[in-house]
Image (tube, coloured by chain):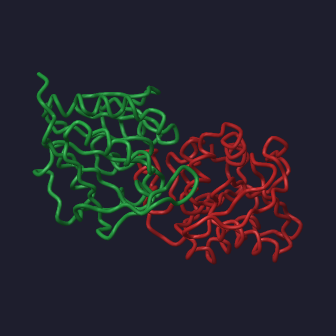
Chain colours: A red, B green
Amino acid sequence: MTQQVEGKRVAILATHGFEESELAVPKAKLQQQGIVVHVVSPEAKGIRAWAESDWGDTYGVDVALKDASEHDYHALVLPGGLFNPDALRLDEAALAFVRAFFQAGKPVAAICHAPWILINADVVSGRKLTSYPSVAQDLRNAGAEWVDQQVVVDNGLVTSRKPDDLDIFCHKLVEEIGEGRHAKHA
Amino acid sequence: MTQQVEGKRVAILATHGFEESELAVPKAKLQQQGIVVHVVSPEAKGIRAWAESDWGDTYGVDVALKDASEHDYHALVLPGGLFNPDALRLDEAALAFVRAFFQAGKPVAAICHAPWILINADVVSGRKLTSYPSVAQDLRNAGAEWVDQQVVVDNGLVTSRKPDDLDIFCHKLVEEIGEGRHAKHA
């Protein structure tokens, strides 16, 4: 049953080297729906974007990861980039934050290389998802069913492959936020 | 039985975004031993280094990947970086080139994030190795035994974690080249 999304709260977890459009576009699209969006990061002073082929602007962080709680949000967004998930998958606090959304049955949206974080959070086994193609073998080896589609929605987990997929990724994310909690994933 | 290494030939396979020291240091150390070193790449016009935290110099390519054959070399080196293995693991010609060294029982040395390429080449199952820590779970899920050591040598496969390990990585690589072919790996 679809609920109103206005006033709901979404965390975007990222660190240096996130792919700029994969944070900025979901943030803008969610805010257009009246959703409150917080950028959460272990780097509380700001995080530097990766803009396609080089470093981009520095983005503000709303909540330091050490002060963030899954209880304060209705859903989680994980942007890609290479440096960003490569660092977050080794950050135990980041993995615990991600895992809490799965345990609570709240929507999680991951795009591009972000599903590497889901591998280390140990939440992909038995799930159907997509990602940037280079991550496919790692996801299959972690027990996921990987498919090459613009977007995959599996029981609250929304995944896409790359910036070109952002429109449908954001559309499905808003739908999932409207549906609220799903059966517990983890 | 250790053989002379002088005059032997080694290929370094890399593309844009290779970690500069992980190509430049092995190249120099091997050349100091009288070994002939060729940089092989799908990007025949030159490849841009990643120098710790930003793009670095462009390096020349000696042999285009499409013209390269495992038969012409005694060993293979795979530098890390993030963009470099992320691209090569999706390049079927690169995977075939890598696989040929394993099938021939020739030494292969991979450092940092380069073992991602070995996952897609399907040559890590049952092997003992190391890598940059973020790649550890992907290697374990691919069937490898991952250990946190400066260097691991397993039947001709030499692996290290990061640029700090380059001295011992190169030392063990030269030893393996001196030993020549091993039991076939693949």
Q: Is B32 positioned to the left or the right of B168 in the image?
A: left
- The quarter of the picture where the N terminus of chain A appears is bottom right
Residue at 56% from the left image edge and 66% from the top image edge: A160
Q: Quadrant of residue A133?
A: bottom left
A9 and B16: which one is in front?
A: B16
- The quarter of the picture where the C terminus of chain A appears is top right
Relative image position of residue A3 (x, y in whole percent): 81, 68
Instruction: For residue A28, say whether it is visible.
Output: yes
Instruction: For residue A146, say whether it is visible.
Output: no
Q: Quadrant of residue A77?
A: bottom right
Extreme residue toward the top, this view: B1
Relative image position of residue A95 (x, y in whole percent): 66, 42
Q: Is A75 positioned to the left or the right of B89 in the image?
A: right
Relative image position of residue A27 (x, y in whole percent): 76, 69
Q: Answer above or below: position of B74 versus A1.
A: above
Residue at 51% from the left image edge and 59% from the top image edge: A129
Extreme residue toward the right, this view: A7
B59 and A173: which one is in front?
A: B59
Q: Quadrant of residue B8?
A: top left
Q: Answer above or below: position of A145 versus A122.
A: below
